């Protein structure tokens, strides 16, 4: 029982990195010096765990955030959040509480706790800096580091629950999945402004890990915070849990039940169902690469990332259909990502049809779909890491198979010839 009351490994990682970010904020450091100090903390954090690739990716991610800053246009929501940030902490809390109270009383016009993530973000923002002075890069990069550490933990949970015992392979997968997230153009893009997306991903991942590790007391708190930040966050956490947990008797029934729930949300709308099928590929490849405007900087880097991920839907089909892949649990990752695509379309349908009174069309997701698909990135990074590890293992085994031993006893000490 005592373990229910103590922070787990992921919580200690979060406290370490966010504590460093708070110290940087209180010190009044500039964005450049703050990112430099955080990069040192992040490098040390991953290096101690022998996750070399992730450690190398930390400074690359920090420099990428600076590169994207001036190129990314400001979002309307971020300007609203920045305005709220000027109020004292207690005033922000009262505003969030008031919006919840109005919504629970049936006032549909009430803003449903918009900006509630500010209750978490405010202590880490140096409010003496303006947006033009990159005031939000330090807290956003700190959250990205925590997310990367949680992705590493989540991939380790998959390995543990599916009997992957090689420590070398486990470290490789952990390092690749965390590193891919840190150098992702999507992360750099959404880190440039003051938005809730990173905080939503943070608590979605934390909820999933605490559930898998049965840290019930901390889980209850994480679920509440996750829901307050973004109402459908628990549904995202469900996909993460189902992807990494050990095999269960009712897993496929739960997958089917989740899909039925999504179909119920869209009320079996034909266009929405077609979009759900399209989302199985779109969740990997967004923005769409065949639109010329999507290749302009900085969006073009996100589009290029989608092309890098383009092979993953093919591997996903293989993971679902191949018996050996299913036996190792890889089909669960593929199915969970597909269901996340269904969730994105269901959310878009609700915003388009129920809130704005528009009709859904095939090819229109109903919202900023690149932003809505962003929380799927941790799971895609984990899948990508497993695919690369699998390909590497396969190629290594093939090289061993084609090794030819030289029979001459006089040449016994000569290394074998390898034919590639």
Image: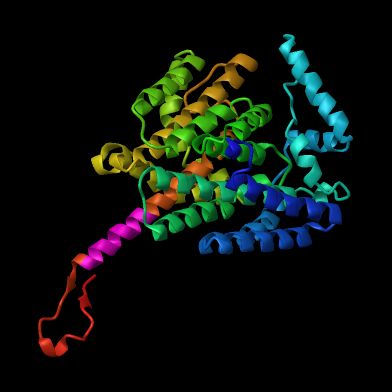
Kindly tell me whether residue 3 is visible in this rendering: yes
* Left or right of residue 46, residue 29 in this image: right
Residue at the bottom extreme, as displayed: 410
**Residue nearer the viewer, 262 or 323:** 323
- From the top left corner, tell me how far across and down residue 254 is, in percent: 40, 24
**Residue nearer the viewer, 214 or 136:** 214
Position of 124 relative to 251 (above/below): below
Residue at the (35%, 38%) spot, across then down:
331
Position of 267 relative to 111 (above/below): above
Instruction: Please say whether residue 391 is one of the residues in the magenta stretch.
Output: yes
Residue range of the region highlighted in magenta in the rendering: 389-400
**Quadrant location of the C terminus in the rendered image:** bottom left
* Left or right of residue 199, residue 392 in this image: left
Residue at the front extreme, as displayed: 1
Please tell me how many numbered marks the rendered image carries: 0
Position of 396 relative to 284 (above/below): below
Instruction: Please say whether residue 377 is one of the residues in the magenta stretch.
Output: no
Kindly tell me whether residue 144 is visible in this rendering: no
Residue at the (38%, 56%) spot, across then down:
389
- From the top left corner, tell me how far across and down residue 376 is, in percent: 52, 38
**Residue nearer the viewer, 328 or 261:** 328
* Left or right of residue 179, residue 12 in this image: right
Quarter of the image for residue 183 reads bottom right
Residue at the (46%, 49%) spot, across then down:
156
Indicate the colouring scheme.
rainbow
- From the top left corner, tell me how far across and down residue 385 is, in percent: 43, 52
**Quadrant location of the N terminus in the rendered image:** top right
Q: Main secondary structure of the magenta part?
A: helix
- From the top left corner, tell me how far across and down residue 406 is, in percent: 14, 81
């Amino acid at each position: 029982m005592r373990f229910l009351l103590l922070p787990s490994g992921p919580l200690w990682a979060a406290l370490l990195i966010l504590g460093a970010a708070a110290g940087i904020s209180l010190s009044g450091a500039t964005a450049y010096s703050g990112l430099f100090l955080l990069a040192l903390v992040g490098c040390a954090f991953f290096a101690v765990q022998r996750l070399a690739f992730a450690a190398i990716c930390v400074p690359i991610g920090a420099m990428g955030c600076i590169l994207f800053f001036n190129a990314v246009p400001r979002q309307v929501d971020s300007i609203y959040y920045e305005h709220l940030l000027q109020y004292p902490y207690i005033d922000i809390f009262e505003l969030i509480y008031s919006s919840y109270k109005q919504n629970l009383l049936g006032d549909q016009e009430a803003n449903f706790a918009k900006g509630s993530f500010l209750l978490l973000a405010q202590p880490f923002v140096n409010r003496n800096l303006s947006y033009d002075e990159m005031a939000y890069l330090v807290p956003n990069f700190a959250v990205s580091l925590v997310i990367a550490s949680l992705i590493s933990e989540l991939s380790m949970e998959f390995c543990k629950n599916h009997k992957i015992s090689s420590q070398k392979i486990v470290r490789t997968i952990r390092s690749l999945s965390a590193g891919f997230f840190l150098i992702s153009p999507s992360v750099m893009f959404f880190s440039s402004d003051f938005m809730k997306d990173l905080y939503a991903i943070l608590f979605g991942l934390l909820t999933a890990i605490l559930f898998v590790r049965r840290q019930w007391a901390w889980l209850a708190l994480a679920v509440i915070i996750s829901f307050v930040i973004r109402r459908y966050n628990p549904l995202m956490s469900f996909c993460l849990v189902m992807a990494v947990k050990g095999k269960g008797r009712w897993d496929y029934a739960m997958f089917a039940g989740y899909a039925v729930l999504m179909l119920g949300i869209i009320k079996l709308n034909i266009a929405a169902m077609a979009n759900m099928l399209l989302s199985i590929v779109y969740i990997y490849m967004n923005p769409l690469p065949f639109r010329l405007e999507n290749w302009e900087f900085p969006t073009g880097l996100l589009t290029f990332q989608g092309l890098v991920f383009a092979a993953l839907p093919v591997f996903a089909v293989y993971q679902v259909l191949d018996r050996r892949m299913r036996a190792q649990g890889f089909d669960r990752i593929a199915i969970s990502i597909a269901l996340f695509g269904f969730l994105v379309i269901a959310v878009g349908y609700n915003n388009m049809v129920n809130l704005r009174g528009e009709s859904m069309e095939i090819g229109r997701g109903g919202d900023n779909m690149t932003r809505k698909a962003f929380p799927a990135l941790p799971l895609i990074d984990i899948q990508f890491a497993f695919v690369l590890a699998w390909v590497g293992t396969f190629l290594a085994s093939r090289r061993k198979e084609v090794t030819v031993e030289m029979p001459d006893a006089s040449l016994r000490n000569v290394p074998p010839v390898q034919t590639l």
